Amino acid sequence: MPAPPPDTRTKSDDALPDLPRKGRGSVSNRPSHRFGVADRYDIDDGWSDHEREDWAKARRKTILGVDTVRRVISRNSSPDVGFDRSINPYKGCEHGCIYCFARPTHAWLDLSPGMDFETRIFRKPDAAQALRQELSARSYTPAPIALGINTDAYQPTEKSERLTRGILEVLYEFRHPVHIITKSALIQRDIDILAAMADLNLFKAALSITTLDRDLARVMEPRAATPSRRLDTVRALTDAGIPTSVLMAPVIPGLTDHEIEKVMEAAAHAGATRAGGVLIRLPHEIKGLFEEWLRAHFPDRADKVLNHIRECRGGKLYNAQFGSRMRGEGVYADLIQNRLKMAVKRYGLDKPGQPLDSTQFRGGDPQMCLF
């Protein structure tokens, strides 16, 4: 378990009560998590409405920390994903998506998966250098890398840090295949290198579009690009010759599932060639965070949404079983999957995709050739 980073929160940060805040997804920042030993709550004594209004307007600043790494490629053996390796330039994500499956990773740092996850961001300044060393190892065997799969590689801080750009430059130099899933229009900044890689069949992109409702997106994914900007990004990437798909991830029963056909239609009109969807996942602390958010923003339908999710998870809010955790189980989950399949077929988003090419890889340590 890595050593926790130094605590740079101020006393006023911890004093803020559990309230929705503009530009942030989480309602709370409770320090309790599955690795903690204490649970603490802020309580509003009700004496001052003005004080509560001030708290509601208070904004948590984003704090950047450093995560020094020797190796940057993470491995997985999950049968539910189509890749065995990934790179995450950042820990935490400023997009603030309330449903993000990566939120519990902040608990390993003894930080809250709530507000801390979206305000305490740790960058990996040595990522490009570490990647170069790993790809240069004589034992390395190439296979497509998923870039930014845990937290978005193009989250707002990437604009200044440019870590993703540096990683892409190394991958292009080594002719290593890579694919990216993002919610950010910032990916357009790197179209020059991404288009060059796509010409060599080394790159594919996917845009995550969960809803077309701008108001819903604003509170559900507060610092991600608006739905229209994401569709514009699909068009820009496609026009540059980059194979681009759309992923409706997650589909939230009772909240966004009525938009399945509309999202697929919009994706097709924007030029996407493929599309799919993933049922919402609520592992560990996300269950509580999501319910808290839902009751704060949509109290009229909170119970309906939670009950629909339970219908898809065998009576629970989450079931981590391989094979079903991405799609759920039961009548309601099957209905969602059938609608996704029909919409994908109806709008021509099932075009066959070409696997990325790993044969062009220029890796290995050239010095070893002397021996």
Image (cartoon, rainbow, N blue to C red):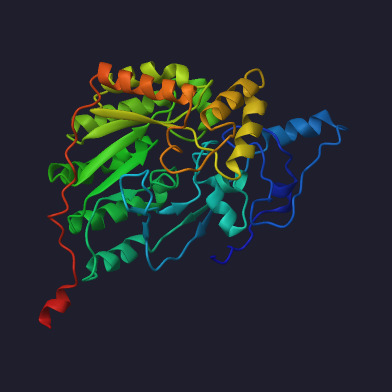
Q: Is residue 1 above or below residue 307?
A: below
Q: Residue at x 19, y 35 (%)?
A: 353
Residue 114, horizontal then vertical, whole percent: 61, 44
Of residues 43 and 55, the one drawn nearer to the viewer in this rendering: 43
Q: Residue at x 18, y 69 (%)?
A: 364
Q: Is residue 62 visible?
A: no
Residue 151, horizontal then vertical, whole percent: 44, 46
- Could you tell whether 207 is left or right of 363 in the image? right
Residue 203, horizontal then vertical, whole percent: 22, 44
Q: Quadrant of the C terminus?
A: bottom left
Of residues 243 and 304, the one drawn nearer to the viewer in this rendering: 304
Q: Is residue 301 above or below residue 325?
A: above
Among all residues in the image, which is located at the extreme bottom? Answer: 371
Q: Is residue 336 visible?
A: yes
Q: Is residue 359 above or below residue 70?
A: above
Among all residues in the image, which is located at the extreme right? Answer: 47
- Could you tell whether 315 is left or right of 355 in the image? right
Q: Quadrant of residue 233 in the image? A: top left
Of residues 318 and 264, the one drawn nearer to the viewer in this rendering: 318
How many numbered circles are shown? 0
Q: Residue at x 88, y 33 (%)?
A: 47
- Could you tell whether 121 is left or right of 53 in the image? left
Of residues 335 and 169, the one drawn nearer to the viewer in this rendering: 335
- Could you tell whether 76 is left or right of 370 in the image? right
Residue 315, horizontal then vertical, whole percent: 59, 31
Q: Residue at x 24, y 70 (%)?
A: 137
Q: Quadrant of the N terminus?
A: bottom right
Q: Is residue 277 above or below residue 8?
A: above
